[in-house]
Image (cartoon, rainbow, N blue to C red):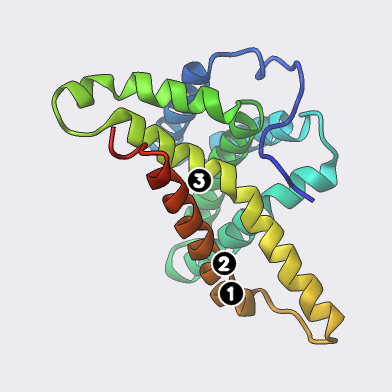
Amino acid sequence: MLTSLYVEGDTFLHRQRPGAKLALILVLGLALYLTERMAVQAVAMAITGAIYFSLPMTFREALYRLKPVLFTIAVLGLINIWLLSPQEAAVSTLRLLAVVFLAAAVTATTRIADFMETITWALQPAERLGIVRAADVSLALGLVLRFLPDIFAHYEGLKQAHAARGIAFRPVRAIGPLIILALKDADAIADAIDARGIRGR
């Protein structure tokens, strides 16, 4: 069962600063957005995919982590084939895959606390202008990353519950229960935050 998005290791990506990794995602995303060449998108997807699947985890675990996202990209790809030309649909799909693979690799090689510290530092200028509260934004990001594994666990629990009752499981049927469970988790976390006075500081 997936308990954390972070993967222990000592790879090149593990040793890089979180800010540099986040900047890399931004630069790659912008660079791929500015080109429509399929060859460039395919090479980028192959490189980022190789980086992600070379991390110290099994291929099955790596694929499991991205299963919902890959399913969504596949659906979007089919819609794009209907709305756009085959080449445009392929370019869009490859671009999404490249960014997703790199983002997943960065998430797997960066601790949540490091993410939060970097986001807080990056938003300091906006906080001085009174636009946002950097600590609140970093806390929100940290909570999202922390509880993604719990959502996966809820999903697996629903699958097992269906199997135990001999009911055919369909992912669409899990959307409603997942939303309810996620909202319950959110309420519990909000109560814990308020009890500690974090949002009142």
Discs 1, 3 touching: Cβ within 8 Å: no
Q: Is residue 132 visible?
A: yes
Discs 2, 1 touching: Cβ within 8 Å: yes
Disc 1 designates what residue? 177
Give the CA distance from mark 2 to mark 3.
14 Å
Q: Under tag 1, what secondary structure?
A: helix
Q: Under tag 3, what secondary structure?
A: helix
Which disc number belongs to residue 144? Answer: 3
| Numbered disc in front, either 2 or 3 | 2
Q: Under tag 2, what secondary structure?
A: helix
Choose the circle earlier in sequence order: 2 or 3. Answer: 3
Query: Is residue 191 placed above or below 74 in the rendered structure?
Result: above
Q: Residue at x 65, y 19 (%)?
A: 13
The one of 1 and 27 positioned closer to us in this rendering: 1
Q: Quadrant of residue 71?
A: bottom right
Disc 2 designates what residue? 181
Q: Quadrant of residue 106?
A: top right
Choose the circle earlier in sequence order: 1 or 3. Answer: 3
> Could you tell me residue 83's position as x and y percent?
43, 69
Check disc 1 and give the amino acid type.
Answer: Pro
The one of 130 and 80 positioned closer to us in this rendering: 130
The one of 98 and 122 positioned closer to us in this rendering: 122
Does residue 200 appear left or right of residue 190 in this picture? left
Q: Residue at x 80, y 45 (%)?
A: 61
Label 2 crowd (10 A; few <14 / some 14-19 / many >=20): some
Label 3 crowd (10 A; few <14 / some 14-19 / many >=20): few
Label 1 crowd (10 A; few <14 / some 14-19 / many >=20): few
